[in-house]
Image (cartoon, rainbow, N blue to C red):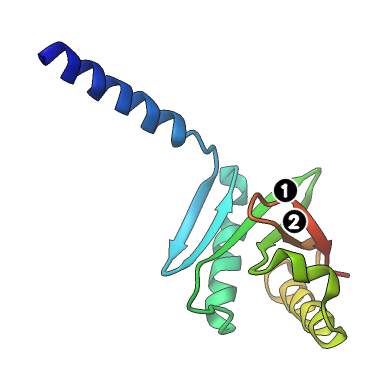
């Protein structure tokens, strides 16, 4: 019986460790989580999290963002609440996203180019904000 209990406990630990193999770091505040991969991205990820809070972009629902840097250029990814509706956004919502990108460009990225994208729940891009 002890052997079975030990084996079950060991199996559970291995399963938990494999489920927690996400290599991303994160800032969590309430229902907002901002993921980032490398310590060099931490300051920008923190700035994005504060930007979200200071600009009343918190919805009260779970929100996930991701900041990553590829070849010297940052990408901010937002998970869409309704991914299927993203491709059919009304023009006023597209304009709001463009305003959001411009505000991030000025306040977080100090007028350096970056990409803002809307993603599915796996952070796979489905729309890039122009």
Give percent across and percent down for residue 125.
Answer: 77, 54
Give percent across and percent down for residue 48.
Answer: 61, 67
Image side of residue 122 versus residue 101, left or right: left
Counting residues from the N terminus, which is met first, the one under dot 1 or under dot 2? 1
Q: Residue furthest front?
A: 1
The count of marks equals 2
Question: Which numbered disc covers residue 102?
Answer: none
Q: Secondary structure at mark 2?
A: strand
- How far apart are labels 1 and 2 at the CA level? 6 Å
Give percent across and percent down for residue 93.
Answer: 79, 83
Q: Secondary structure at mark 1?
A: strand
Which residue is labeled 1 in the image? 69
Residue appearing at x 63%, y 69% in the figure: 81
Q: Quadrant of residue 7?
A: top left
Q: Nearer the viewer, residue 90 or 77?
A: 90
Give percent across and percent down for residue 124.
Answer: 73, 50
Instruction: In the rendered view, tell whether residue 47 sits above or below residue 41.
Output: below
Q: Nearer the viewer, residue 61 or 113?
A: 61
* Image quadrant containing the C terminus: bottom right
Residue appearing at x 80%, y 58% in the figure: 126
Which residue is labeled 2 in the image? 75
Instruction: In the rendered view, tell whether residue 27 sits above or below residue 8.
Output: below
Image side of residue 15 versus residue 112, left or right: left
Image side of residue 41 versus residue 100, left or right: left
Residue appearing at x 82%, y 77% in the figure: 89
Q: Nearer the viewer, residue 4 or 64?
A: 4
């Amino acid at each position: 019986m002890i052997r079975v209990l030990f084996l079950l406990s060991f199996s559970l630990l291995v399963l938990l460790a494999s489920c927690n193999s996400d290599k991303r770091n994160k800032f969590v505040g309430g229902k907002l989580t901002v993921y980032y991969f490398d310590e060099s991205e931490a300051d920008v990820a923190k700035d994005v999290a504060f930007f979200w809070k200071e600009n009343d972009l918190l919805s009260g629902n779970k929100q996930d963002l991701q900041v990553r840097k590829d070849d010297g250029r940052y990408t901010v990814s937002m998970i869409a609440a309704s991914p299927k509706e993203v491709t059919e956004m009304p023009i006023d919502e597209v304009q709001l996203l463009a305003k959001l990108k411009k505000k991030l460009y000025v306040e977080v990225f100090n007028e350096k180019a970056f990409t803002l994208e809307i993603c599915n729940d796996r952070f796979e891009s489905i729309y890039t904000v122009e």
